[in-house]
Image: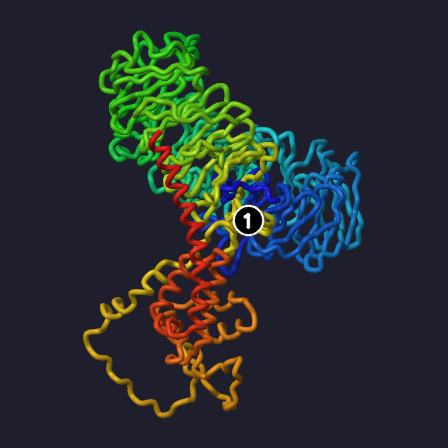
Amino acid sequence: MVQRSKIFERNRALGFVSSHVPCVVRYIKMRNENLVATVVGRCFHTYGCNRFSVLSVSGLHPADITCLAADTFHIYTCCDTEIYAWRRGTELKHTYKGHLKPVHIILPLGAFLLSVDEDSVLKLWDVKSEEELLEYPFSNDTFQISAVIHPATYLNKVLLGSKQGTLQLLNIHTSKLIHTFRGWNCEVTVLQQAPAIDVIAVGLANGRIILHNIKYDQTVMMLIQDWGTVTSISFRTDGPAMMLSGSLSGHIVLWDLEERKPLTQLISAHSGAVAGMKCLANEPLMVTSSPDNTLKMWIFDMPDGGARLLRIREGHSSPPTFIRYHGNNGHNIVSAGSDSSMRIFSTLTETFNKSLGKARYNRNKKIKKKTLLDDENPCMPPVVFFASETTREKEWDDIAAIHLGMGVVTTWSYGKVKMGDLKLIPDHLKPKTLQSANQISATCLTLTSCGNFVVIGYSTGDLHKFNIQSGLHRGAYGSPTAHKGPVRGVGSDSLNQVVVSGGHDCCIKFWSFKVAGSEVLSQLVLDEPVLFFHVHRESSLLAIALEDYNVLVMDLDTRLVIRKFEAHMSQLTDMAFSPDAHWLVTASLDCTIRTWDIPSAHLVDVFQVDAPCTSLTFSPTGDRLATTHVNCLGVFLWANRCVFEHVSLSPVRDLTNIPLVALPSTAQCVEPSDYLSEIDDPIEHMPKTNEQISEELITLSSVSSSRWQNLLNLDIVWKKNKPKSLLKKPKTAPFFLPTIPSLDLQFDLKAENNTNEESANAFQLKTSTTGFAKLLFDSVSGSDFDKAMTKLKELSLSTINYEISALSPEGGGSLQMIRQFMKLVQSVLKTNRNFELIQAYFALFLKKHGDTIASEMVLCDELQLLQTVQLDKWNVLQNKLMSCLCIVDSLKSM
């Protein structure tokens, strides 16, 4: 059985840009554009440098990609021990198998491909034939290969760098070692060809960069990078003699090779290591990638010769902590990450992604240019919860956010795409000393539907209301505090009449919104402490997560608990209502995502994922579910199958075999293994045919009601639709071909062989017989009427009227044809299928041929048999209907 959810289908992942694998750049002459390829887990993305937009996403690999390379024709990827060659970023052309250990270095060499695995076994492949041409093993104890380069103009030769610090020049054509370089007693991390022939830039783990002439084995110059290990090196080829080097700390140094000194520096170019760096050929542009999930393009147009950021594609550098859909169109998701940033992800295209920036204590304070780090204006703790409203997003801030362990609530503007200036905290809760700063923290908040007020709950039990436009305090609830212990959840109704709060003291309290400081209106005591709230204002439903892993659903109008769901085996992390409040989706640290049907109070779907879900949100349009997971940088979208197809949801009884579903990938298509197999479950999937679940039940047809409902009123319909002006007679055709008289135009090209002999016990098929009548005639010898019934269901109203009218002798048929149609009706009634359809056909049949049937004894006898079957089936249906009506009346009276 396929491991899948009944409701949610994997769609795609958002927010993935790059990883620790260095990016590669290739020039496409036909496009006149440089393309950049970056690795994202099990696939790679291709970006166009002109607009920096995603051009293609590759297919999924069996495991994570370990290295990446490219030439004019292919992009090469390594996954475990196999190497793949791709054309146009999506078409898999070649696969190279032969390594016994995972491959970590690949290097295209024209018609050949060189690869090195973790055992330092070097192999050479023919690109087209996939044939292994050479195997050259090295010993990790003496020469563990860490970098490979093909020196320019050195035919059939490669330069190998090792972790032991030595270099070797190898001829791959003759399999001979040409020369061994002594090295510098430090691991070689990078080898890069300089614009000058014979000169190679060697990056070492201790931060030194050596420009070495391999022809004479002489060092041209040595530079020292203060930031530690050299992770990448690149040279400008558009004029200036400049070299760039990247470091583990994310800084980039620009070196003036003529002066042999640093020209300038890009401090914190990335928040992670500079994994890949490439200057575009003959252009003042540079592309860098990093494990911080960013891809940046820089342009060298600064007065001091430095570079500035030109374009960027980025996602969260740390896993997202909280997400919510913003607006009612379901196109944008606001996310907060562990990197203290907030971002907007578009579900339509990556081009519309935006960054609201990082949360800082003083947003307007500028960082000095020469500072090494932003210690003078550090980031605030990450956002763990926020609420947003679109009502006033054009006038003032429309997002309020809670930070981890902080009592200050910050505001953000979705429309202005930035952090606001307000920081909300009551005066008496402001920390007086540094020691007391971490003792008070905001725990929950809600924005009112009008977008004017924010109600905040604190760990001290306080509940305060602020105006989000001015940041002024507008009152507190409770005296002296709203709850005894931390406030865990707060919500408000859509009309700003009631505020509901829940706390660690197991109490749910209702307060008057307008009269701050008043006494509690009503109170409900629970058995367990509240963990968090989720309000669905349109339906006045409140979902309450408890610390005992259960979920309560409360009606805010009646203030009563209407549902209780028990199934999770660990602490709940988040939950969301569907737009119509029909479902409640919950996530827990037990790695399961469960869907509850609120009207029936049943669990209708459950599936588990590899990493626990930390936050989830339902699209306002109901077509997608978005989730975030532990140690995952992206936002994952799941399609709601109920929007696109019929899904029969039965209660989940067996919780022992919960399906394990893999997380969506950045590719918008699913893996072939997901749709090649189907679940043969008649309850979960509607049958493709009209087969019945039970022989005792009546099955209706799938034919539209417009195809049979007006069969008895066709005369009235035709009279209403009669044109006011008479139709003009068409011009006479120059010639006529012989045709067969029927509704389907058929030319009679064969000579007719008419015979005058007729049998007394059989009737001959006449030339005027229609297509349906032919199928009805073919069923005389047997009792199979399926083809005739299928043909009848395909016809239009006027055609059905003609076909049934043509059964009589006056219309070209015969009494035998009328009797055969009565047998067809009897056969369909016995199968309990197409019940309403056959009733409509039979009613039209009696209207057309009632007089003929009454005058023929044979037809009257057949009608008696048909009447018996009709009454039997109707009695069964009537008994079922009456039983249901009795049960409903009994329940109403109770």
Left or right relative to 696: residue 705: left
Quadrant of the image containing the C terminus:
top left
User: Measured from the top left, where is residue 388 in percent x and y?
Assistant: 34, 30
- Quarter holding residue 601: top left
User: Measured from the top left, where is residue 771 in percent x and y?
Assistant: 46, 75
Residue at label 1? 25
User: Measured from the top left, where is residue 847 in percent x and y?
Assistant: 34, 68
- Quarter holding residue 714: bottom left
* Residue ranking furthest to the left: 724
Q: Compared to 411, does 824 lie above or below?
A: below
Amino acid type assigned to the residue bearing label 1 in the image: Val
Which residue is more in the foreground, 292 or 628? Answer: 628
Does the rendering let one see residue 217? Answer: no
User: Measured from the top left, where is residue 149 in percent x and y?
Assistant: 67, 46
* Residue ranking furthest to the front: 857
Which residue is more in the foreground, 687 or 455? Answer: 687
Quadrant of the image containing the N terminus:
top right
- Quarter holding residue 626: top left
Does the rendering let one see residue 657? Answer: yes
Q: Residue at x 41, y 41 (%)?
A: 883
Q: Compared to 787, does 342 lie above or below?
A: above
Left or right relative to 470: residue 258: right
Which residue is more in the foreground, 712 or 428? Answer: 712
Q: Residue at x 34, y 60 (%)?
A: 709
**Figure disc tally:** 1
* SS under mark 1: strand
Q: Compared to 595, does 552 lie above or below?
A: above
Left or right relative to 431: residue 679: right
